[in-house]
Image (cartoon, helix red, strand yellow):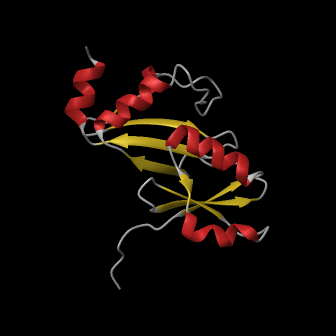
């Protein structure tokens, strides 16, 4: 067997529609048209996809359980999109793990990549990462 890629990650939220709106507003994810039939069942997932139609998240209507620091869903973006995300933080209410407002100062320099960590409104831990290190570094340090 040869794995092609991760298809999707299960995420527990109390309200799939509210979560779909949040993930759409913050990450640009949209309901996967070709998989909407699964969401018709109350226990089934509402699948969110990228703008290109690649499924990435399966939202399940369940009470979210507390997650650990190691339970993180990481999304890779190009450097320009990483910087746009940082620029959007002033108008968006996104929380750090400790509940404080996420700011561009929370971006983490990993020497070969840049990341920023935050939670969705239901406590699921997320990460945006860019390997366009020099572009991000040069922009943030000016």
Q: Is residue 9 left or right of residue 6?
A: right
Coordinates of residue 9 in the picture (x, y in percent): 55, 62
Q: Residue furthest front?
A: 33
Q: Residue furthest top?
A: 142
Q: Nearer the viewer, residue 106 or 13?
A: 13
Q: Nearer the viewer, residue 117 or 90?
A: 90
* Tally of numbered discs: 0
Residue 27, compared with residue 58, is above or below; it is above
Q: Quadrant of the N terminus?
A: bottom left
Residue 53, compared with residue 13, is above or below; it is below
Please report the residue visible at 67 percent of the width from the left and 72 percent of the height from the top. Answer: 38
Please report the residue visible at 54 percent of the width from the left and 25 percent of the height from the top. Answer: 102
Residue 70, compared with residue 113, is above or below; it is below
Please report the residue visible at 62 percent of the width from the left and 23 percent of the height from the top. Answer: 100
Coordinates of residue 133 in the picture (x, y in percent): 24, 35
Coordinates of residue 112 in the picture (x, y in percent): 24, 39
Regarding residue 65, the answer to whether it shows in the image is no
Please report the residue visible at 79 percent of the width from the left and 54 percent of the height from the top. Answer: 63
The image quadrant of residue 128 is: top left
Q: Quadrant of the C terminus?
A: top left
Q: Is residue 105 left or right of residue 22?
A: left
Regarding residue 14, the answer to whether it shows in the image is yes
The image quadrant of residue 24 is: top right
The image quadrant of residue 59 is: bottom right
Residue 70, compared with residue 102, is above or below; it is below
Q: Nearer the viewer, residue 67 or 56?
A: 56
Coordinates of residue 119 in the picture (x, y in percent): 60, 39
């Amino acid at each position: 067997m040869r794995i092609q890629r991760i298809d999707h990650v299960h995420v527990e939220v109390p309200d799939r529609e509210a979560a779909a709106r949040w993930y759409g507003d913050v990450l640009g994810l949209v309901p996967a048209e070709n998989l909407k039939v699964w969401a018709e069942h109350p226990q089934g997932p509402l699948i969110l996809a990228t703008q290109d139609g690649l499924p990435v998240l399966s939202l399940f209507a369940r009470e979210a359980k507390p997650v650990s620091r190691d339970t993180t869903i990481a999304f890779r973006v190009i450097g320009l999109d990483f910087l746009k995300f940082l620029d959007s933080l002033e108008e968006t209410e996104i929380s750090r793990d400790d509940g404080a407002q996420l700011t561009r100062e929370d971006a983490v320099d990993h020497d070969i990549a840049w990341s920023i960590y935050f939670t969705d409104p239901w406590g699921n831990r997320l990460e945006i990462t860019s390997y366009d290190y020099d572009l991000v570094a040069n922009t943030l340090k000016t």
